[in-house]
Image (cartoon, coloured by chain):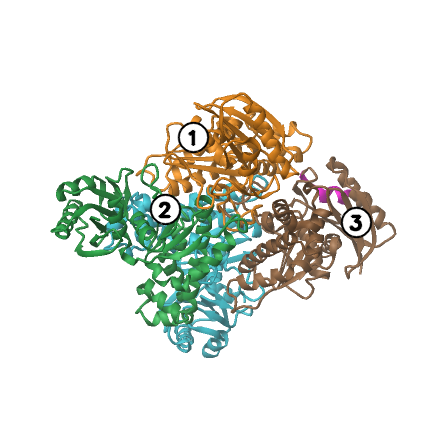
Chain colours: A green, B orange, C brown, D cyan
Amino acid sequence: MALTIGVDVGGTKIASGVVDGDGRIVARTLRQTPADNPEKVAVTIADSVSELAAGLDVEAVGVGAAGFVDETRSVVRFAPNLAWREEPLREKVSELVGLPVVVENDANAMAWGEYRFGAGRGETHVVCVTVGTGIGGGIVFDGALYRGRWGMGAELGHTQTIPGGVPCGCGNQGCWEKYASGNALLRHARERASADPSSAAHMLGLVDSLDDLRGEHVTAGARHGDPAALEAFDWIAGWLAQGFADLAAILDPGCFIIGGGVSGAADLFVDKVRAGYAERVTGRGHRPLAEIRVAELGPSAGLVGAADLARSR
Amino acid sequence: MALTIGVDVGGTKIASGVVDGDGRIVARTLRQTPADNPEKVAVTIADSVSELAAGLDVEAVGVGAAGFVDETRSVVRFAPNLAWREEPLREKVSELVGLPVVVENDANAMAWGEYRFGAGRGETHVVCVTVGTGIGGGIVFDGALYRGRWGMGAELGHTQTIPGGVPCGCGNQGCWEKYASGNALLRHARERASADPSSAAHMLGLVDSLDDLRGEHVTAGARHGDPAALEAFDWIAGWLAQGFADLAAILDPGCFIIGGGVSGAADLFVDKVRAGYAERVTGRGHRPLAEIRVAELGPSAGLVGAADLARSR
Amino acid sequence: MALTIGVDVGGTKIASGVVDGDGRIVARTLRQTPADNPEKVAVTIADSVSELAAGLDVEAVGVGAAGFVDETRSVVRFAPNLAWREEPLREKVSELVGLPVVVENDANAMAWGEYRFGAGRGETHVVCVTVGTGIGGGIVFDGALYRGRWGMGAELGHTQTIPGGVPCGCGNQGCWEKYASGNALLRHARERASADPSSAAHMLGLVDSLDDLRGEHVTAGARHGDPAALEAFDWIAGWLAQGFADLAAILDPGCFIIGGGVSGAADLFVDKVRAGYAERVTGRGHRPLAEIRVAELGPSAGLVGAADLARSR
Amino acid sequence: MALTIGVDVGGTKIASGVVDGDGRIVARTLRQTPADNPEKVAVTIADSVSELAAGLDVEAVGVGAAGFVDETRSVVRFAPNLAWREEPLREKVSELVGLPVVVENDANAMAWGEYRFGAGRGETHVVCVTVGTGIGGGIVFDGALYRGRWGMGAELGHTQTIPGGVPCGCGNQGCWEKYASGNALLRHARERASADPSSAAHMLGLVDSLDDLRGEHVTAGARHGDPAALEAFDWIAGWLAQGFADLAAILDPGCFIIGGGVSGAADLFVDKVRAGYAERVTGRGHRPLAEIRVAELGPSAGLVGAADLARSR
């Protein structure tokens, strides 16, 4: 079976890899993202692809990028970190590399990767939630990636959790990602640490000042038993559980997958998400419970997913 | 093209009709629902079908029923108004009538009817919200009805709108249907009328006591300018708009359809729903706005939809 | 010590009593309220007083009434159940009976009665919350009844508990009394009973239909272990606890008193209120916990309080 | 009339002044706070007082400090910024300076200063809300400062605004100060600026990075018309209005005073607070509207208030 290339375009790095039909990465390359120059991003993607494709039988290219991608998987309408506006990325890259190209939202690509080769194997209806700075999402229904009418579906982090709640960068208030993301975890830990440093002794020992506290310190604090850190994980677990219950009412998936940076500490909170979900999902007692799983492919999920989507384009 | 029969099983009536390939009802029958005897319901459905099918070329039967229908469209797992529990309705009716049968959730059937022959014509991604006593839903994606992994998707009324909010019969608190349904409309109008009868003069003139107030009186009050009634419609319009914004973040449909009993008064609130949706949907300014339409098929939507689903089974 | 007379003006009855300096009722009378004729109410009050005062050394009269009473304790500005608007009740009654009169909001009178002779004895800072159909309040600070700048303080039931929450007759949304009153208890029990009658078996056996369910049935259901009833009591207990925590942040009282009709079933929920309060009050660990007590004077609290306020006028 | 000395103990500075009976400061001194050594703070206070008192007829000393002060105005139970725990400050300072001393919570002292000589002159029932990093409060009832049973009243910033809302340093969630303080203003402006830098052009021109943004920049941005800054002020105005409406339901004051650091920009938001309050206060239409005023004494309010409280001790 022919190979495909997956490209994951981040705000600082462009990771590319040659992927075979079983989702294995057989070659890789990594470049800096020329983030201030959207024109150069296409060229850098093309260079990465050309370098990897040399001498191989590569069939197509899949590019995953943070942003709104149109329903034809061609144009990036809006990418906050890359200054793209109505960027015809598919056409540009395809001309430069002479191969078919598909463009996909990065969280969608990640969800597809996990569905095909990771935690979602064997399921047909999967909701993947990437918990990082914010919350992204990807949805697989009946074995197909769901994009919506205009390619803007699965923006799961921007459903309203609390009317009148915390303002969100998207212009709304009380969005789910303000309560259940890595930033929410950090905000909670900082508040508690500031009010009662004794509850955050280990964490605070790792940094010079509270401003320097990052998610990794909260994780370390939780592993050492800092009450402030444990409480912060419980907090996001509760809101993740509530969000999953709401998504199940709408989508009734067979499983949820928790991915993204915070999933690296999933052992600290996934059981609480499962318990909270079981207590809150509507129709409980009359329905099977969706499984709640942790992503398995790590940071490569997007690259692998994009490559596989190119294969089945 | 052959005909199919659609059956809409309600708590008090069973409505059946012969439907052609264009969604036209060419014959009808209506019977009482023997609601206290689940066994007799299957027999009554079969009798209706046999009566209608006599002498016609009927290909298949579609049955819509309020309740959780399994993903194979065969078994009604739980139907609150009909005392069905794990009822193998497809098999029972099929044996009695000698035709292929599919069973479908009633809100799904209604959504399909509107998608094929009503307000959703020409769209590929449709979310239909039935606003009655509670809120039901049906979702069409890429031209296919979405059921979820276990047939329990699109229970849109039971997503959480307000944490810690009004208790719901489903066992949760703050469900959307507690804020945006016909019952919510009535509750709001009663509260205002009780506190300030002068704001509800027309409505109160129609009933002996506040306990007798029904949705039709609130509608009449609104048409006569009762402030309490107008405010009640504004209230559900605001929460419908918020719910649509959240659904768009997840599903990105091309249009929403408002159906159900309250949609008969849609002229009193649909413009406010549209305006509220446009103000709240995430990514506004970077996405086309989904249309918000009013259902066109009225109470027949479920019957027509069930018949058509039987055709494409 | 001379005697005083207290009058409690309700929507259906006017209860009057002669009260001694120790809060003992030494004589009583009860009359129908001519509720549709505000003029006759003053006359009926005066008749009751004259009848009771005959042959006794009565010093003054205190009248408690539901409504907004001005800061001079003379005029009832607005009384929803009695059609009083800017009613100079003090002057009218005083002229008719030839004694000094003070008028007081009924929940204030009740709080004063409990403070002086009931559950609040020995405390100097008391917040009394009357939990009935709605929620009323009375506040005693440093041994004095608190009325506010215009006599409208202590309307505790109309603080906002949930932004965008249930509409209230006062014109706002999400008022505390919508979540923690007897009506809230009943609403919760009805919702659960409707959704799952088996969880409400005892309650439902007491009534012909769900519409007939009243607070007394929920209490009986809870005593027999109906899960729907127990859950309803837990629900109001949680919201009472939260409201007390908020009031403590503002008022820092030495004790709270739970009065009103629902307090007759206080054994079913007061421990949960105490536990919830202890978990939620700000500064916990650095402050003494206010006691949470149950009212002791029952329905006579208002009459006794009004009489005593007349004494110390 | 004799003079008194007021001392305002902050986390970085100790401001002291000699105040006459009309609230005029006739002499001042300012020292660094030895914040890491609670013992030295008392000595520094005493030194300031002795220096100022030399040669004057000083009657008493009032000390205002952030923290929980007991109901006898003697002991600081807990002061987050000064490491005081059960500190007998009154006794210590009194012994060192040989004068009567009273200790008061700083927000209480500020409220008293404004009541006596600032924006509250002529009122008898005043609620003063200091809007800075967090929210503090002071309450004057019937011309007396309200302290509560244990000296912990008027912690207005820690009432719950949103159930399940933003975690607060006090250990609760959704506290008012998380939505209506200077920090809330800043958080809102940062979110909007991050999502849409063009809406924050002036603000962002004043700082190197978003992390450096401070309240003064948001104020400057608002004055230059940055939409992100204007929206942030509107947001806190709305939550201040809601909080005032809730406080009026409980306390019915004649006026509210907005003080604290954010009150320096009050012209940008106070009209919105007034309008929002008028729309939300319960009983509107049946009650006079409390005035909403801006503090007049600036940063000296606490010192002046503490001095005056010493006079009337």
Could you tell me how far apart the alpha carbons at marks 3 and 1 are, in whole angstroms?
68 Å
Q: Give the prevailing secondary structure in the magenta stretch.
A: helix
Which sits in the foreground, A87 or B90? B90
* Residue on which disc 2 sits: A139
* Residue on which disc 3 sits: C16
Q: Do the residues indicated by labels 2 and 3 lie within the same chain of the protein? A: no
> Chain under label 3?
C
Instruction: Determine crowd level at label 1: few under 14, some 14-19, many 20+ residues with C-alpha closer than 10 A.
Output: many
x%, y% of residue D283? Answer: 58, 42
Q: Do the residues indicated by labels 3 and 1 lie within the same chain of the protein? A: no
Q: Tag 1, which secondary structure?
A: helix
Could you tell me how far apart the alpha carbons at marks 1 and 2 are, in whole angstroms?
22 Å
User: Does residue D31 appear in the picture of this structure?
Assistant: no
Magenta stretch encompasses residue C274 = no
| Tag 1: amino acid | Tyr
Q: Which residues are magenta?
A: C85-96
| Tag 2: amino acid | Ile
Q: Tag 3, which secondary structure?
A: strand
Contact flag, marks 1 and 2 (Cβ < 8 Å): no
> Chain under label 2?
A
x%, y% of residue D139? Answer: 52, 57
* Residue on which disc 1 sits: B115
Could you tell me how far apart the alpha carbons at marks 2 and 3 are, in whole angstroms?
69 Å
Would you place residue D277 above or below residue B60 in this image? below
x%, y% of residue C119? Answer: 70, 62
Magenta stretch encompasses residue C94 = yes
| Tag 3: amino acid | Ser
User: Does residue C208 appear in the picture of this structure?
Assistant: yes
Q: How many marks?
A: 3
